[in-house]
Image (cartoon, grey):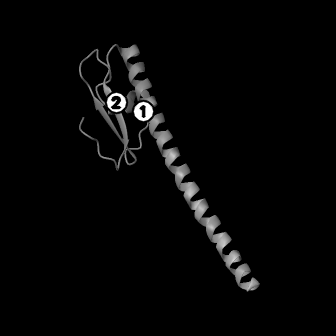
Amino acid sequence: MKSLAKTIIIIAVPILAAVLLVLASEKLGSKEGSESLKQLENSVRKAVMTCYATEGVYPPTIQYLEDHYGIQIDHDRYGVFYEIFGDNVMPQITVMEASAEPTDE
């Protein structure tokens, strides 16, 4: 009976450790993705403000920021939604993971 219990423990402990490792890595990966999303949005906002301070107008498109202000966007991974309301009104900037669909507000 003791050898059966030992065998079960010897098999169960590595399996449990592997499951815990997988769960921990998934949680860490989702946190990292959220942080890079936030970082991209902050970079785009800073570039928009730099453009406004330098040129006196907000950039017309995200492509303009990429061409003139060095913003690099992984378009396969992120969608950047940029809405202009007027010449002197800060544009609305929304950054989402590419697989996520924007919601109507």
The residue type indicated by label 1 comes to Glu
Q: Nearer the viewer, residue 75 or 16?
A: 16
Looking at the picture, how far across and down is residue 2, in whole percent? 76, 83
User: In terms of sequence position, does the residue under pointer 1 or pointer 2 come before the other?
Assistant: 1
- In this view, 8 is above or below 90: below
The residue that mark 2 highlights is: 93
Q: Which mark is residue 41?
A: 1
C-alpha span from label 1 to label 2? 8 Å
Quarter of the image where the N terminus is located: bottom right
Q: Is residue 41 left or right of residue 82?
A: right
Identify the secondary structure beneath mark 1: helix
Of residue 92 and residue 72, the one placed in the foreground of this image is 92
Residue at the spot 52% in from the left edge and 45% down from the top edge: 31
Q: Nearer the viewer, residue 1 or 7?
A: 1
Task: Tell me, yes or no, whether the two marked residues, 1 and 2, touch with CB atoms within 8 Å.
Answer: yes
Q: Residues within 10 Å of mark 2 (few under 14, many from 20)?
A: some
Q: Is residue 1 left or right of residue 32?
A: right
Viewer-proximal residue, 32 or 19? 19
Q: Residues within 10 Å of mark 1 (few under 14, many from 20)?
A: some
Image quarter of the C terminus: top left
